[in-house]
Amino acid sequence: MRIRAEHLSYTYNADTPFAAHALHDVTLTIEEGEFFGIIGHTGSGKSTFVQHLNGLLRVPSSMKKYRRKKPKKGEIPPPEPVLQVGQFDLTDKKTDFRALRRSVGTVFQYPEYQLFAETVFEDVAFGYRNFAEKKPMEHETQEAVKEAIEMVGLNYGEVRGMSPFELSGGQKRRVAIAGVIVTRPAVLVLDEPAAGLDPLGKQEVMDLLHRIHREWCRTVVIVSHDMDEIAENCTHAAVFSDGEVKYVLPPRELFRHEKELLDMGLELPLVAKLCLSLERQGIAIDCDFTEEDFIRKVLALPRQMRIC
Amino acid sequence: MLKDVSFGQYYPVESFVHRLDPRTKLLFVIAYIAAIFLSKNFYGLAACAAVLFAAIGFAKIPLRKIVRSMKGVLFLVVFTAVINIFFYRSEGARILWEWKIFRITAEGLIFSGFLIARLFLLVICASLLTLTTTPVSLTDGVESLLTPLKWVRFPVHELALIMSIALRFIPILMDETDRIMNAQKARGADFETGGPIRRIRAIIPVIIPLLLSAFRRADELGDAMDARCYTGGKNRTKYKKLRFAAGDFAMFVLAAALIAGVVLMRIYLGAPV
């Protein structure tokens, strides 16, 4: 499903002294099939944006009470926001938000803290049963849960009867992800999927997401503040800062904006930093900023250049 | 959804009432409650109301905040009023309408009106206190006012600490609840439809992670306090010392005047019915 947002703005606690503008006139398109990265500093509005995608935060015009404000004389009314996820128009009051949430799976930050059921099986089945049109047959549920648990790389026979609280941190996170993808959403949104994991755990989660992307969910959107994660994994990345989208680029072009990124409190990916310092030494390397590609191209350099 | 809970509803503006010492405000609220209960007629309540609305004006609190706090007790007020309208009994009451055990009397109506006014004044006064005082300074005030109890070995400091930790954690736990609810909503949980039993069941996936995280936080907080060698109230000094200023003394005078006025009105102007 294609995701299209135009002129999207959002204010927390509007009309109170605590009002905080989280999004300002965001325009962004995510094509079907992408592994899309959203990067930004804390408070840049990236989480607010992704919570719009499954209707947890609503565009004001989709709310029951909403009435359009009449523009004052001589004032140009702000452009109407647009937010479309596949066939769903999220600015419409009549949107079926249940169906939307079934097609847009959302994994929140630290999803292991949402586990609650007595067994791993019950926890993963929670979403499946909630979204079923009519009460699913037991064997259907079992089948779906088994596939989801195996998809995230856990041993179904071993963990199905265990309490989710007996598992290790990384396993808990896998179970939580299984609990979201069990309904086979077309779009999978993950907020900081690798936060708080050790380097190996991070790599495993990313590999898992690529596998889900290949086999189950056509479009994957990840939110992160870690440039390396985005550069290594994404087809396109949107840079958020102060509630606005600054750039939408393939990660390999991000390094052209080194200074601006630093000003936004973001670091360049490690590989990009290496490339830049090599460039200053007069060695230009044209790579796509994944570690593998970089190493291959460095090794392909003429021998005498490598020794310096 | 959870934003409607008006707890820890501090409204941050700069005003005379906000600047008052929390102890003054606490004592004033107690005096005010006494004044309300000492009033036996509408004159007394009118005096109380005048003081209260003047305070709201000085505190620069928007009226809709006040109205919202009234909504919270609307059910209680209506319930009390209805009971009193139908079941008020007194000798020589003028009967307006009667059916079986239900009887509406003129005096009953007046008395119910009196109760409604009294309840609303109580609630508005209490919420004005929390609107103008941060939870932290409120607990400071409570601790300071309860100091005499230390003489009978009452753990005042510990009580204040428990209060301030509880207050401090309310917004955190509310945020957490919001987050967990969102996560479960994303997995298709439905908190808004169905009968009471279904709704209670729907809360389970929120309550369990919330309890777990509360325990986790409590553990972490305990460790953090241990790590900083916290041993309780003995010999602790305060970063912010409470001090009375001229405004506080003015409030004491006002409280005394209000109580005196209400008592005089009670003696000379008689009961409402």
Image (cartoon, grey):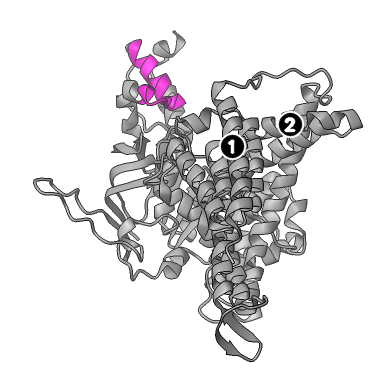
Q: Amino acid at mark 2?
A: Leu
Query: Mark 2 highlights which residue?
Result: B145
Q: Nearer the viewer, residue B144 or A158?
A: B144
Residue in the foreground of this view, choosing between B36 and A138: B36
Q: Is residue B180 visible?
A: yes
Q: Residue at x 69, y 66 (%)?
A: A122
Q: Nearer the viewer, residue A80 or B46?
A: B46
Q: Residue at x 37, y 26 (%)?
A: A264
**Crowding near pointer 2: few (<14 within 10 Å), some, many (20+)?**
some
Q: Secondary structure at mark 2?
A: helix
Q: Is residue A110 visible?
A: no
In the rendered view of the protein, which quadrant contains the C terminus of chain B? bottom right
Instruction: Reply yes or no: does residue A49 show up in magenta.
Output: no
What is the three-letter code of the residue carrying label 1? Ala
Q: Which residue is mark 1?
A: B257
Label 1 is found on which chain of the structure?
B
Q: Mark 2 or mark 1: which is in front? A: 1
Residue B41: image quadrant is: bottom right
Q: Position of residue A271 (x, y in %)?
A: 44, 26
State left or right for residue B259 relative to residue B67: right
Q: Which residues are magenta?
A: A261-281
Q: Nearer the viewer, residue B2 or A44?
A: B2
